Amino acid sequence: MYIHSNRHTDYYDDWVNYCKGDSVWKHRLFHNFSCDGGSCTDHVSWVDDQLVENCSTQCTANNTVKKCYDGNCTDAGICNSSICGADVACDGKKLWVSCGAGRICNSTCNCVALAPLEITAYAPESAVNDSRGATRTFNISINQAANVSWQINGSVVQTDKSVTAASYTNTSAEIGTWNVSAIVSTANGTGMQTWEWTVTSPCFIATAAYGTPMHEDIDVLRDFRDEYLMSNPPGRAMVKIYYTTSPPIADVIRANECLGTAVRSGFVKPLVHISRVFV
């Protein structure tokens, strides 16, 4: 039995970091075991405190300062003119915020004039055509951080704050013609991208005549509708009239098998044959 420290079991923990003001320090624990009266006690103590780095005097490549967070010296993203060389107008500000009328702190904490606000890319192209229940995503890219308001027929459905790219996804397309707009805004101006989104249902009459929306002939009619009718105003008007008038006709066809056969062979089949020439 040992009366003093048991040198066979004493050990040091690995180094760990911790914050001390704006500085990161490191230390390790010394475990000193001593045995008395048949019991072994661990006398733990801090040893070897050592300064790692002083966060308050550390700068990043973009002229922002570092701060001590959770024991680590981390970029605070705050421009600093006294030790990091940032523009005085950006001192104490975060990147990409205003530093004056029509000016912004750029990626190196320089106060520069804003370029005109511009939507640099968008997808998909307008007009957009889908069937009821489809999932559709709209995307934009912007040449500077901006707020984005997504609207459908003038009603706000989503907002994004201070972004250079944004997207909106609709997962439950309903029948109709919808104006989907992405309105971007900064202190430097506003911009907008609008899509005309047309959502249709399967061909009512053809579906009733075949008894299923999955027949390959109906696929041909859908393709003809999307490629040749929905791509121009007169065609879209025809489709709108069709979807307004055809549901009650489809109900009658669906209730009469003989009528369904006659419509399928005398109307739908010839229409499909003509459509195949184009699609």
Image (cartoon, rainbow, N blue to C red):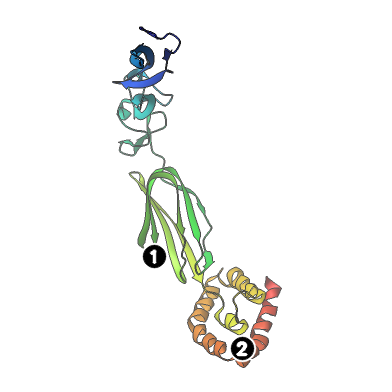
Q: Which residue is mark 2?
A: 260
Q: Examine the rendered structure and indicate whether residue 25 appears above or below residue 7.
A: below
For label 1, count other residues whose C-alpha is less than 10 Å away and answer few (under 14), some (14-19) or many (20+).
few
How many angstroms separate mark 2 from mark 1 (CA)? 38 Å
Q: Nearer the viewer, mark 2 or mark 1?
A: 2
Q: Secondary structure at mark 2?
A: helix
Given the image, on which type of amino acid does mark 1 rest? Asn
Q: Residue at x 70, y 79 (%)?
A: 273
Q: Residue 277 location, x and y as percent?
A: 71, 74
> Tags 2 and 1 in contact by the CB under 8 Å rule?
no
Q: Which residue is mark 1?
A: 153
Q: Examine the rendered structure and indicate whether residue 27 appears above or below residue 266.
A: above
Q: Which of the 4 quarters of the picture holds residue 102?
A: top left
Q: Which of the 4 quarters of the picture holds residue 13?
A: top left
Q: Residue 55 location, x and y as percent?
A: 35, 20
Q: Residue at x 32, y 29 (%)?
A: 90
